[in-house]
Amino acid sequence: MTQSYFHEGELVGVLTAQPLDRLLDYKAPEGGCHLGAFVEVPLGPRKVLGVVWGAGQGDYDRSKIRAVIRVLDVAPMREEMRVFLTRAADYTLTPLHAMLRLATRAPGLGDAPSMRKVYRLADGVPDRMTDAREKVLTVLRDYGGLSFTLKELAEMAGVGASVVKGLVKHGAIREEEAPRDTPYPKLDPDYGGKELSADQAAGAEMLRAALRTDKYGTTLLKGVTGSGKTEVYLEAVSECLRMGRQALVLLPEIALSGDFINRVEARFGVKPAEWHSGVTMTERRRCWRMVGQGDAQLVVGARSALFLPFQNLGLVVVDEEHDTSYKQEDGVLYNARDMTVLRAAINGAQVVLASATPSLESWANVEAGKYKRLELKSRFGAAVLPKMTAIDMRVEDLPGGKWVSPSLRTAIAARLERGEQSLVFLNRRGYAPITICRACGHQIACDHCDARMVEHRFLKRLMCHQCGETKPMPTVCPHCEAEDRLSAVGPGVERMGEEVAALFPEARIAVLSSDLYGSARAMKAHIEEIAEGGTDIIIGTQLVAKGHNFPKLTLVGVIDADLGLQGSDLRAAERTFQLMRQVAGRAGRAETPGEAMLQTYQPEHAVIRAILAGDEEAFWAAEAAERKAAGVPPYGRMAGIILSSPNVQEVFDLGTEMARRDAPLRRIGAQVFGPAPAPIARVRGRHRVRLLVKADKTAPLQQALAQWAGQFRLSTNLRLTIDIDPQSFY
């Protein structure tokens, strides 16, 4: 049986967030400590944060073992959290100390609770009553003697701070010191429920019933854009709150959190706890502490909120579950969607994966019976799905260097006349351009892979970023033999803006791209202005595909629907399909029906046909069959190995050596591809080389990868990163 309490002087094994590959032995402090206690321990000349992970080993001179300095005044780490961190570390091949760092990313955990001044009603009476003073006292009486900060009280009463201070002098209000890290106000599950449509109500009841089982389960909540998925999963949140358990809602973008927080407040009467890079350090510490004490019922956050110390987690919602931003691409490489399922399984919690266009992984798990499926078929209210049409670019009369086809131009002009908005959308997914033949639409692909070849201008060659194959840049199309019609495709948003401004000089044009804003607040303000009708034509990248509602938008024109169809990324077709459906869903969300027009050189491509037909099941089935045949995720396993160094020769030498000494991988039937230069071959002065490992679904991949990588000694400049289930291949 595991020891759960250690008396003073007993040996404890402490895990720190320092880059060490083992637990460190310390003596339990005066008063002892619990398993999972957060402690401060000496490490060399420093004091560092750690967690009591178990009994000490005691395998060297006890007289040299130092004592724990102190136990921190925070709730101990629960067993299920220690299990989650251990299993997540094993799965992602991440050192445990790095996982602990993710779970302790709150500043000042070891600080004594800081204090602030609060004000509450007292017994004194002011010498004379003024309107302003009466307002302050009324607020305090109305709230039954609750305390407020000076700023809160002055704002609620609509008076200056000096009025409150004056009442303190007269003894009518008491000024007290109170801890800053206070519990969050209670959410009321019965406060503001909306009337639901028949299929929303049935969906909400299905999720509530799943929660009442008190067991783990995952449900894919699929619904067309505008079908009211949020209302349905907020009903599940309210059931979770009634049961006295904690809920977490993960969002892919901080830019979406403001609107969402307002919706939560409208539904439950108060704001939830927030956890993302946009909140202050003080708020982060308060959130971390209150979650651990059970005094935060609902957290809305970015992917790292999954590592908060929940005391009784009952529900996790992953909104827009297909979104690539759930994959952490630096530091600890993990996919928050997959880790959510792991954490919920350990905690006996329910998971809701919500999306209009689910990932193939989630679809495959539904097909295999691992997840339940809940579908909302109709848009909420009067809105209907937009009409989808393709513009065949092979027959459009378009001069070189221009991108808006005559057909799309006519459609935009008609919207301008009617006072409606149009969106000109660029699919910017994927880093490298496609080399395409403007005569027949052929894209030059690698002879050994399904990947497109990418032009490297300084080499005057085409290169495959999957396997490293190169060939000279051809002057003739290998498919239709047309001369001088090959070009690298891909306009930029600013260039697009100039073209649209030249075509429609009278129109009000807004360019929406995340890199054009100095802050999230500036971006939000601009989006609100557009939604209110301050723009005629919006030019945007993927930013506009996510969650924004433009009521006057009735036309979406997609400039380059083909870009991304044959990427070096195995998920290229899936992402194109998702993105096109999401973007098209922006049109016609109010009473006026919308239309989405896709400019394409390949109207007969299976993905384009599936988008136009709206036949998602046919698309998923075809995509699944292709992936199954190729033995790639979700029907096989993959790992990306990224090597980097300032010395280009050093990374290639190690990559070649790794490919040669692949016996541990061959033993489990895995294959190694590469080494090849990464698509972005130099980042911050470091040269990058990739290898790709492919294995069967059931192969013990992590174990084999650890043995394989363990054979090589790395110089101080060399870095080796293993990415399990890579989402991007840059």
Image (cartoon, grey):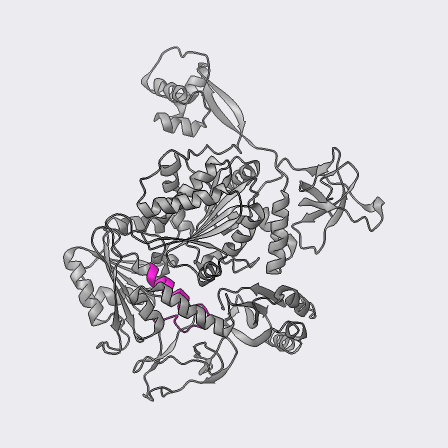
- Can residue 449 be seen here? yes
Which of 534 and 191 lies nearest the eye of the viewer? 191
- Can residue 300 be seen here? no
Which of 54 and 332 lies nearest the eye of the viewer? 54
**Is 638 part of what is drawn in magenta?**
no
Q: Considering the image in quadrants, where does the N terminus appear?
A: top right
Q: Residue at x 59, y 59 (%)?
A: 92
Q: Is residue 693 above or below residue 199?
A: below
**Could you tell whether 410 is left or right of 84 in the image?**
left
The quarter of the picture where residue 31 lies is: top right
Residue 86 is situated, as x and y percent measured from the top left of the image, at 64, 53
**Could you tell whether 717 is left or right of 149 in the image?**
right
Residue 642 is situated, as x and y percent measured from the top left of the image, at 57, 68
Q: How many marks?
A: 0
Q: Is residue 386 above or below residue 237?
A: below
Residue 38 is situated, as x and y percent measured from the top left of the image, at 66, 41
Q: Residue at x 49, y 21 (%)?
A: 175
**Could you tell whether 192 is left or right of 239 in the image?**
left
Q: Which residues are magenta?
A: 560-582
**Could you tell whether 387 is left or right of 610 in the image?**
left
Which of 485 and 327 lies nearest the eye of the viewer? 327
Residue 13 is situated, as x and y percent measured from the top left of the image, at 73, 47
Report the residue that reaches farthest toward the left. 417
